[in-house]
Amino acid sequence: SALVATKADGPVDLLAGITCVSDWIASDESLFPPDEPPIPSEEGRRRAVDALIRCGFVRNQFRQGLSFRDIFGFDPYPAQQAFLDAVTAPGVYVLEAPMGMGKTESALYAAYRLVEAGVHTGLYFALPTRLTSDRIHERVRAFLKAVSTEPTAVKLAHGQAWLREFEAGAEGSDKTSGARPPPWFNPSKRGLLFPFAVGTIDQALLAVLNVKHSFVRSFALAGKVVVLDEVHSYDAYTGTLLDELVRRLRDLGCTVIILSATLTAARRKALLGPNAPDTSGYPLLTGVRPDGTTVMRELEPPPSRSVRLRWLDTTEESPLAAAVAKARAGCNVLCIANTVPTAQEWFRTLKSEMSPGEFPIGLLHAKFTAHDRERIEDEWLRLLGKPPKEGPDPRPHGSILVSTQIVEQSVD
């Protein structure tokens, strides 16, 4: 009854969480067979340590003193360096910057330094959807491969993670790191307990909802660096829960890194608390540390670029005909539809208006099977993504990709 009465307190969640997890381990018949004789008291500690290791609760070893370039292959931009200079201790930090300024790399390197220094024990990278999670999962695996002294797995935590793990099981170990999370962490309620995980925001939000095993999720996140990405995309309901999650994580001693394209001053204050710096600068880093001290730095904006916009009068000119004309002129064209049926209709129309094999044309939306979607994304990221560091640029001389708004958050 005391636990229920003080449920809102982080320390009580920690006590309930460690008790529950300890019970799960002690009740595992593969670790402690029910027909074996009682364990002598002098053997208890050794058996307990052995059980933890067999489950997968092992502290990872990291290469010491790696620079930003050592991990990512380039020196940090001025805005990234300013962020890294500020995020040196636990707290809640908000990084607002446009796409292309390296927010993800900044968050990962800050996490590396905090874990390397022993301040934290792991990382959870939370995103709005499972599709965005899948993409960041690949990047975090590559990041851990660069910083770990031995193969280190990254747990994928969302509603369809079992399907990705099933496919990986059919193909063998993780292709990036050569490691896979131990099977003890397979149940969804245990996924966040793994030291390094990437998943959807709902997996973390369950820590502040009145649901079964919410305290286990609080315990799982305690002591970690928690990155909350694409925060500008959440609605009012999710945003309210997110405010409570950030408060809980702060009480649990986490470092919370919030990444967003932009936030209103009201949303920033709701996330950081009453001590939030009051500013309208952009790009911007703001933060609040446990002792109440604040961080506020206006970051160097990206280089100025000129973008041409031309509105099409669809009563006089077909946007699809314009797309074909541009592709034939050597442009790579992205057509974004509001709905999947519209994207499918556009794709069929385009296919009928062009000669077979004239130039690459593709369709990408959220209703493909996971296998087909991954194959299509990989192909178009190869064609239109960042060029390789070595070798020729594969970008075609003319192409059309028809998609929905998933290209903004998922494929980026």
Image (spheres, grey):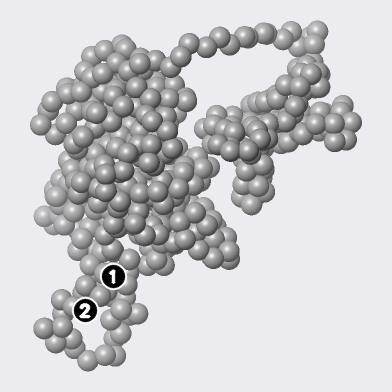
Q: Residue at x 10, y 31 (%)?
A: 291
Q: Amino acid at mark 2?
A: Arg
Image quadrant of residue 35?
bottom left
For the N terminus, the quadrant is bottom left
Q: Which residue is mark 1?
A: 53
Q: Work out whether residue 220 or residue 214 is closer to the camera in this orientation and state it.
A: 220
Image quadrant of residue 399?
top right
Binning the other alpha carbons within 10 Å of mark 2 as few (below 14), some (14 to 19) or many (20 upward) gives some
List x then y, in percent, for residue 410: 54, 36
For the C terminus, the quadrant is top right
Q: Amino acid at mark 1?
A: Ile
- Disc on the earlier residue, 2 or 1: 2
- Is 143 above or below relative to 365? below
Q: Are marks 2 and 1 in contact (CB under 8 Å)?
A: no
The span from disc 2 to disc 1 (Cα, nearest Å) is: 10 Å
Image mark for residue 47: 2
Q: Residue at x 28, y 31 (%)?
A: 84
Q: Residue at x 62, y 9 (%)?
A: 308
